Amino acid sequence: MAAFAAHMGAAATSLTWPSTTAILPSAGGGGRRRWRRWRAAFRVSCSEAGGGTVVIGLAADSGCGKTTFMRRLTSVFGGEAEPPRGGNPDSNTLVSDAATVICLDDYHSLDRTGRKETGVTALDPRANDFDLMYRQVKAIKEGRAVEKPIYNHATGLLDPPELITPPKILVIEGLHPMYDERVRDLLDFSIYLDISNEVKFAWKIQRDMAERGHSMESIKASIEARKPDFDAYIEPQKQYADAVIEVLPTRLVSDDEEAGKLQSVKLVVKEGVKHFGGPAYLFDEGSTISWTPCVRKLSCSYPGIKFAYSPDTYFGREVSVLEMDGKFDKLDELIYVESHLSNLSTKYYGEVTQQMLKHADFPGSNNGTGLFQTIVGLKIRDLYEQIVNERAASPALAAVA
Ligand SMILES: Nc1ncnc2c1ncn2[C@@H]1O[C@H](COP(=O)(O)OP(=O)(O)OP(=O)(O)O)[C@@H](O)[C@H]1O
Ligand SMILES: O=C(CO)[C@H](O)[C@H](O)COP(=O)(O)O
């Protein structure tokens, strides 16, 4: 325990970054020019959200599709999401025209060695600096730039900080966006990716064996080792999420081999979320619907595709649940499904299908994960526009946002 305390102390010291104003060159030609060049190099846009950045939280375990979701979301707002130009090549940040995505791994207060020596995992709140996370997310939301630390996944060390200036939309993604009440209260919308162990294992095998050279046994062992802390600190956050995308093995067949290839995906959305404009629905809002699409209009191989929609409760709150089981064979036929869905917050007929086709090579594009991530992305665009419009109509609100 003493070693742990010593580590926490060391980590706290190493994370006491100079305040942004302290490191900004003060007035004076050379300093100001250097500062402008530096800021331009990072290509981050200043907030145009009319009085503050809109903040979105995305929670999930490692390897559960956060990056894939982020790429779909930022694409809805326009422009490719890229690492900050001219910055640390191991930065975890992604910057697009309107949105900046920061990874909460950057708030690890214990580096890899520190965690190993203390036996504290990255999922444990003690390995993360929530005070700094809160202060910095709050500052960005209020329109102030921050010097955010970087956790370097290549080296396992904490690197010197990077500058984040307030974008229109800030997405904080990682293990704990809804863990700390103060951070949670800063979120305008929150999402939890609830990936079942079986599916997580299949996705991790695909990535960590093929791309990172891990063995199947070590992947299994790592998932098992993380499980107690995952159950204690990560999963409970789903009760706070405004939207949950739940991914389970298919229920269309029981055969293990077939089941491993297909997923049953649910989009659970809370009713009455401010600025959200209500959940998307199938056929008739509030009804309970089970739909097997016509095979002549939507090609699908065995065992087919099923949709469902119903009102429900989730952690005591009223929700609406959309479900898709199975996979699409021809993505352009998705327009048939889209035409039966309502309240999608699209700007034109077919926008969901167009977004899905645009990213046909992203994982999950042929099933409910891609479809529901795309719908949530479009609904977040709508939420953002509603917030901006409300602030424009009431400047007094913008001042306190
Ligand atoms: N919907 C999906 N269907 C199938 N595979 C997927 C899906 N989403 C992600 N994957 C796979 O899972 C792996 C992890 O995805 P991704 O990098 O998006 O997750 P992550 O949560 O950002 O991971 P990490 O936190 O470890 O960086 C990748 O190999 C990806 O191909
Ligand atoms: O749960 C995680 C979030 O991505 C990582 O395991 C955590 O950030 C530690 O990273 P690394 O294994 O690279 O030291």
Image: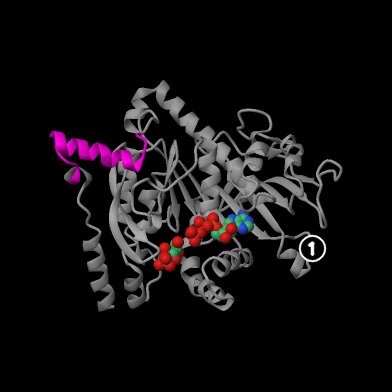
Residue 161 placed where, x, y %?
A: 28, 53
Hey, which residue is sitting farthest right in the picture?
Answer: 296
Coordinates of residue 21 in the picture (x, y in percent) = 19, 42
Residue 373 in sight here: yes
Residue found farthest to the left: 28
Residues in magenta, as a range: 23-46
> How is the model colour-coded?
one colour
Is-magenta flag for residue 5?
no
Residue 24 among magenta residues: yes
- Relative vertical location of residue 164 with respect to residue 115 in this rendering, above or below: above
In this rendered view, identify the residue nearer to me: 46 or 104. 46
Pointer 1 residue: 253
Q: Amino acid at mark 1?
A: Val
Kindly identify the residue that appears in the image at 82 percent across and 57 percent down.
Answer: 303
Q: Secondary structure at mark 1?
A: loop
Q: Position of residue 148 (x, y in %)?
A: 30, 51
Classify 10 Å Cα crowding around label 1: few (below 14), some (14-19), many (20 and above): some
For image coordinates 36% across by 66% down, the residue present is: 155
* Position in image of residue 189 (x %, y %): 48, 43
Residue 95 left/right relative to 74 = left
In the image, 80: left or right of 146? right
Q: Quadrant of ligand 1?
A: bottom right
